[in-house]
């Protein structure tokens, strides 16, 4: 629901600086910007920091799409100019990710069955991301960010699974219904248990059906889906 929470004050030595480029790193939780980053962005301090500034967004997300749209909406309200977009996504298929994330949450171990790595971004993503810095630096030095996103995309800065974008749009609407039902409801614990059951059914039953329908209709919407991919790889 993107309701901000109270955050610690941002030090004046950060607030009172002028920035050539702000790199905004954020996470996506349940297809929406995480509560910490959302709370920060909706603060008066963030409004002061981002007002009229050039911004490069750096996100990690298994599903990238509506989360970035919500970030861009807030930044646009501050008249910030988004000049770049880097997205590190999980290389595992969605159902493997479900298992590995739960395994990590309950055991603290970063690999499932000794093979599947579950953290996003993964270590090789971190190690190879230095190449993006090599692309960004000359643009900062020249204060010219034209074509920077095209260069980043060619270097693999935004690898997107279109089926997950397809899923993201629909799941956002459903999550919104659940959120409005649960928020402030005295039966919250019971409703959360219902939501957890719904989530498992959605992942293990409904998503495979959705993928089958997606695959069968792919040729019919090829051009539309290619256009959507280009959109999410841009700024």
Image (spheres, rainbow, N blue to C red):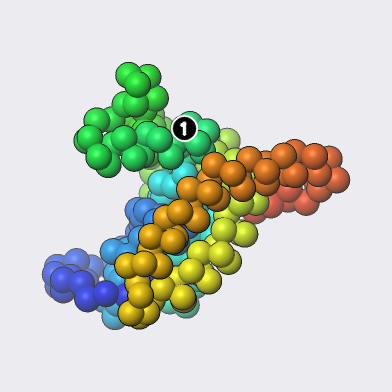
Q: Can residue 100 be seen in this view?
A: yes
In this rendered view, identify the residue nearer to me: 189 or 59: 189
Mark 1 Cα within 10 Å, few/some/many (few <14, many 20+)? some
Residue 60 vertical placement versus 193 (above, below): above
Question: Residue 227's x, y, as percent?
Answer: 73, 50
Read off the residue under disc 1.
Answer: 96
In this rendered view, identify the residue nearer to me: 10 or 191: 191
Image quarter in which the C terminus is found: bottom right
Q: Residue, x 22% and y 35% (percent of image)?
A: 108
Image quarter in which the N terminus is found: bottom left
Considering every residue shown, the one lying at the far right of the view is 220
Q: Residue, x 68% and y 43% (percent of image)?
A: 209
Q: Residue, x 51% and y 64% (percent of image)?
A: 175
Question: Residue 89's x, y, as percent?
Answer: 46, 40
Question: Residue 9's x, y, as percent?
Answer: 16, 73
Considering every residue shown, the one lying at the far top of the view is 114
Dot 1 lies on which element?
helix
Residue 9 vertical placement versus 216 (above, below): below
Q: Residue, x 73% and y 44% (percent of image)?
A: 214
Question: Residue 159's x, y, as percent?
Answer: 54, 39
Residue 2, quarter of picture: bottom left
Q: Is residue 234 visible?
A: no
Residue 23 vertical placement versus 117 (above, below): below
In this rendered view, identify the residue nearer to me: 31 or 77: 31
């Amino acid at each position: 629901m993107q309701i901000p929470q109270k955050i610690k004050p941002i030090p004046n030595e950060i607030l009172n600086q002028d920035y050539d480029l702000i790199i905004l790193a954020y996470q996506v939780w349940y297809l929406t910007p995480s509560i910490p980053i959302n709370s920060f962005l909706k603060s008066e301090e963030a409004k002061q920091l981002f007002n009229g500034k050039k911004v490069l967004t750096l996100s990690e997300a298994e599903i990238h799409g509506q989360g970035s749209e919500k970030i861009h909406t807030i930044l646009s309200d501050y008249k910030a100019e988004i000049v770049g977009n880097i997205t590190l996504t999980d290389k595992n298929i969605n159902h493997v990710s479900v298992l590995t994330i739960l395994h990590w949450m309950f055991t603290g171990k970063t690999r499932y069955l000794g093979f599947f790595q579950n953290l996003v971004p993964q270590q090789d993503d971190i190690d190879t991301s230095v190449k993006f810095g090599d692309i960004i630096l000359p643009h900062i030095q020249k204060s010219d960010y034209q074509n920077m996103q095209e260069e980043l995309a060619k270097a693999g800065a935004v690898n997107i699974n279109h089926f997950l974008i397809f899923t993201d749009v629909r799941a956002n609407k459903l999550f919104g219904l659940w959120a409005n039902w649960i928020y402030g409801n005295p039966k919250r614990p019971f409703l959360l248990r219902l939501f957890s059951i719904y989530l498992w059914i959605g992942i293990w039953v409904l998503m495979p059906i959705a993928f089958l329908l997606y695959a069968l209709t792919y040729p019919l919407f090829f051009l539309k889906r290619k256009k959507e991919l280009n959109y999410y790889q841009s700024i």
